[in-house]
Image (cartoon, rainbow, N blue to C red):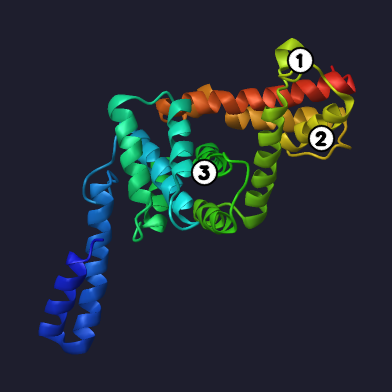
Amino acid sequence: MHIFGKILGTFFGFLFGGPFGALFGLFLGHQFDKARRLSQAGFNSSPFSGGPSQAQKQEEFFKAAFAVMGHVAKAKGQVTREEIQLASAMMDRMNLHGDQRTAAQNAFREGKSSDFPLDSVLERVKISSGGRFDLLQFFLELQISAAFADGDIHPSERDVLHRVAQKLGFSSQQLEQRLRMQEAAFRFQRGGFEGQSGGHQQSGHWQQTNAASQLSDAYKVLGIDEEAEAKSVKRAYRKLMNEHHPDKLMAKGLPPEMMNVAKEKSQEIQNAYDLIKKVKGFK
């Protein structure tokens, strides 16, 4: 815990200004400790350091993603071995090795700290992403995906995700919509639909009851109602693909380490659309 600045600020504030000075010194000390913590975590918080390069912005985005993952995981209390394994699985999805994996692990550990400055880190994410909607949406969906990796979200995790969404500029309704889409995506992936092979389960058969559930989830992955007409389905598909296209995200500043996750997401959207087209006979 970083309290050195608070102690010094309170001491000198009281020395020169009495009780009111102590309070003011405590405030300044808190700001110093927060800036020092961000700096040690790899976040450039100084307004006098000049504009960061694209590589620095990507590095900050990358570290913030894993730090916030750690903070969300800690929301339930003690971080369990399963949650650490889930974080490791996310690192595997990104093919992180060596220094990259170590940086992700350190950031995740930093996020678990009781005095982790969540709001400040999220503010830096908005700055490093240039406020681009697609990147902020990707960041939020990454947190949801990590939290939902075990198939469920704890109420405390949900509360933190709402705080993350709000700070990034998303409403509670938008977050809940993405939570429903991710829940459906989790079931859809387990169903084993593969658009290129015509649709089948991993067990090798396609039962009608499971097909209906799979189709329902496919609509939810696209964020639309099952009664939607072909035109609305195509519009939703094109919008999501445009927002999640890996190359477009990379061009806007997505860290290269996260390219695989972006590809997985776009493939997930594609598979959901392919299933709807197959069942409904869309062209």
Q: Secondary structure at mark 3?
A: helix
The residue carrying pointer 1 sits among few (fewer than 14), some (14 to 19) or many (20 or more) residues within 10 Å by Cα, namely: few
Extreme-top residue of the structure: 197
- N-terminal of the two: label 3 or label 2? 3
Label disc, if present, on residue 143 of the rendered structure? 3
**Residue with the mark numbered 1:** 204
- For the N terminus, give its image quadrant: bottom left
Query: Does residue 282 appear in the picture of this structure?
Result: no
Q: Residue at x 23, y 70 (%)?
A: 28
Closer to us: 92 or 179: 92
**Residue with the mark numbered 2:** 216
User: Amino acid under label 1?
Assistant: Gly
Which one is in front in this view, the residue at disc 2 or the one at disc 1? 1
- N-terminal of the two: label 3 or label 1? 3
Q: Secondary structure at mark 1?
A: loop
Relative to 24, is 19 above or below? below
Q: Residue at x 49, y 55 (%)?
A: 167
Closer to us: 213 or 121: 213
- For the C terminus, give its image quadrant: top right
Q: Quadrant of residue 218?
A: top right
